[in-house]
Amino acid sequence: MSVQTPITMRPPVAPVPLRQDFLGGLFVTAVAVLAYWLAADLPAGTLGGMGPGMMPKALALLLGALGLTLLFGSLWHFGERIRRWSIRGPVFVFGAMIAFGLTVRPLGLVVAGPLAMMIGALASDEVRWGETIVSVALTSAFCVGLFKLALGLPIPLAPWLIGY
């Protein structure tokens, strides 16, 4: 008696324009083009004397390369078909950005940063709160060390506690 294996059915292949990786690559590339266009008037300077346009242009080029990699990779690999998506993610991520912008001046970086990250974590229904809290604490400490201590940027840490 021979053992028969069931025939596995592969889901039908979605047309390229309806694949998540194709649309994601297209979107990321479009954002990169927009970012580079918006930074086009800023002088880049040189590596020895960086101008205000160096970083935005470099990041736009890097983002564009990643978007094109995703876009062209979708032509050779079978990506997942675009599905109906929830509004939860964009709402909480956008809400986190708004909360940071509204609270960074009056409450400082030590409150605004963790608040924004916790609101952003609500964007996923798969969040693990223990890991999120550890990540928020480490990221907040890194941001305070980088932006306030190392770079000396005029960002208030905790004006309600230690002043500006």
Image (cartoon, helix red, strand yellow):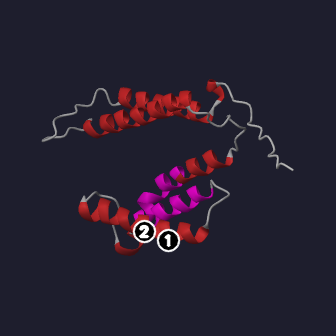
Kind of residue at badge 1: Val
Characterize the local packing of mark 1: few (<14), some (14-19) or many (20 or more) Cα atoms within 10 angstroms: few
The answer to which of 109 and 127 lies nearer the viewer is: 127
Secondary structure state at the residue bearing disc 2:
helix
In the image, 42 versus 19, the foreground residue is 19
- SS for dot 1: helix
Q: Position of residue 140 (x, y in %)?
A: 42, 65
Identify which residue is drawn at 68% across, 34% down: 81
Q: CA distance from mark 2 to mark 1?
A: 6 Å
> Is residue 157 in view?
no
Q: Residue furthest bottom?
A: 161
Q: Is residue 113 magenta?
A: yes
Task: Say above or below: 43 vs 130.
Answer: above
* Apparent side of residue 2 relative to residue 47 in the rendered image (left or right): right
Could you say where residue 34 lies in the image, as x and y percent from the top left?
43, 28
Depth order, front residue of 137/67: 67
Label 2 environment density (alpha carbons within 10 Å; few <14, some 14–19, many ≥20): few
Quarter of the image for the C terminus: give it: bottom left
Left or right of residue 150: residue 65? right
The quarter holding residue 78 reads top right
Q: Which dot marks residue 27?
A: none
Residue drawn at x 28%, y 57% is: 153
The residue carrying mark 2 is 138
Q: Is residue 160 above or below residue 120?
A: below
- Residue in the image at 46% along x and 70% along y: 137
> Can you see residue 21?
yes
Residue at the spot of label 1: 134
In front of the other: 76 or 54: 76
Q: What's under tag 2, amino acid-wise?
A: Leu
Query: Are circles 2 and 1 on residues that touch, CB within 8 Å?
Result: yes
- Locate residue 156, reporting x and y percent: 35, 63
Residue range of the region highlighted in magenta in the rendering: 97-122
